[in-house]
Amino acid sequence: EVQLVESGGTLVQPGQSLRLSCAASGFTFSNFEMTWVRQAPGRGLEWISSITGGGSKNYADSVKGRFTISRDNAKDSLYLQMNGLRVEDTAIYYCVKDGWWYYNWGQGTLVTVFS
Amino acid sequence: DIVMTQSPDSLAVSLGERATINCKSSQSVFYSSNNKNQLAWYQQKPGQPPKLLIFWAVNRDSGVPDRFSGSGSGTDFTLTISSLQAEDVAVYYCHQYYSLPRTFGQGTKVEI
């Protein structure tokens, strides 16, 4: 059974940094593209970044230059380094196993940026 | 970027009645290489992550009740719940995986 468990979400102030982690299990992690999707409180879904098994990365314009996605295939883990956080980055961040459509989602981790 | 626009934003349907949600993409999401539309539908209930319902615009995921169906091609798509059940109260999103950035519709809230 595929499991994705996010961690690292917390309350931070604008301008601070945070690193989110996602522990994956139940599948051959290195074979799959992985994605971060976020959802602001009461709002819709926003794709923010993806990384292929080989490490090729893509970012939404809203986070480009501030966020960095990475993975450790030996540890079956996905990461999101978030720098220069803004109030508008407040959201639940979901780790998603990519495969064109998004079948497997984690439960999400809440990041709150408050001034 | 492909903009996904859903309509309506919300709808109230009686139990047992049909619910229809529309999704329009700003450009075609039909992929000629595999002859499929790169569109999925998700259901999200409060406090939960989204759940996949439909992929390739028309294929129901395993375990999804057959009252859910997807249709459409190119730029215009529809999710239909043929006979609304109480457990179908949720927000529904369409999603294009044709190109980056992946984009979602704004969501449609279905209520009884």
Image (cartoon, rainbow, N blue to C red):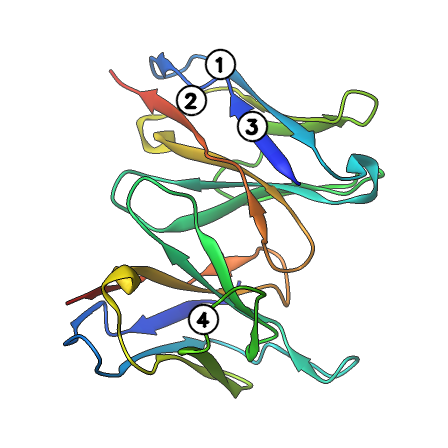
**Other residues around mark 4 within 10 Å, as few (<14) / some (14–19) / many (≥20):** few
Residue that carries the numbered disc 1 in the rendered image: A17
N-terminal of the pair, mark 2 or mark 1, is: 1
Q: Find residue B29 and report its horizontal and vertical position in percent.
A: 59, 76
N-terminal of the pair, mark 2 or mark 3, is: 3
Dot 3 falls on a residue whose secondary structure is: strand
Q: Do discs 2 and 3 belong to a common subunit?
A: yes
Disc 1 to disc 4, C-alpha distance: 43 Å
What is the three-letter code of the residue carrying label 1? Ser
Q: Find residue B73 and report its horizontal and vertical position in percent.
A: 54, 87
Mark number, residue A5 = 3
Residue B82 sits in quarter: bottom left
What is the three-letter code of the residue carrying label 4? Pro
**Residue A98 seen in the current view:** yes
Q: Is residue A58 above or below residue A16?
A: below
Front of the two marks 2 and 3:
3
Residue that carries the numbered disc 4 in the rendered image: B65
**Other residues around mark 2 within 10 Å, as few (<14) / some (14–19) / many (≥20):** many
Disc 2 to disc 4, C-alpha distance: 41 Å
Query: On the picture, is A26 further left or further right than B72?
Result: right
Which chain contains the residue that carries disc 2? Answer: A
Mark number, residue A85 = 2
Residue sitting at x 73%, y 45%: A33
Q: Do discs 1 and 3 belong to a common subunit?
A: yes
> Badges 2 and 1: C-beta atoms under 8 Å apart?
yes
Query: On the picture, is A109 further left or further right than B11?
Result: right
Which chain contains the residue that carries disc 3? Answer: A
Query: On the picture, is A114 further left or further right than B57?
Result: left
Quadrant of the image for the C terminus of chain B? bottom left
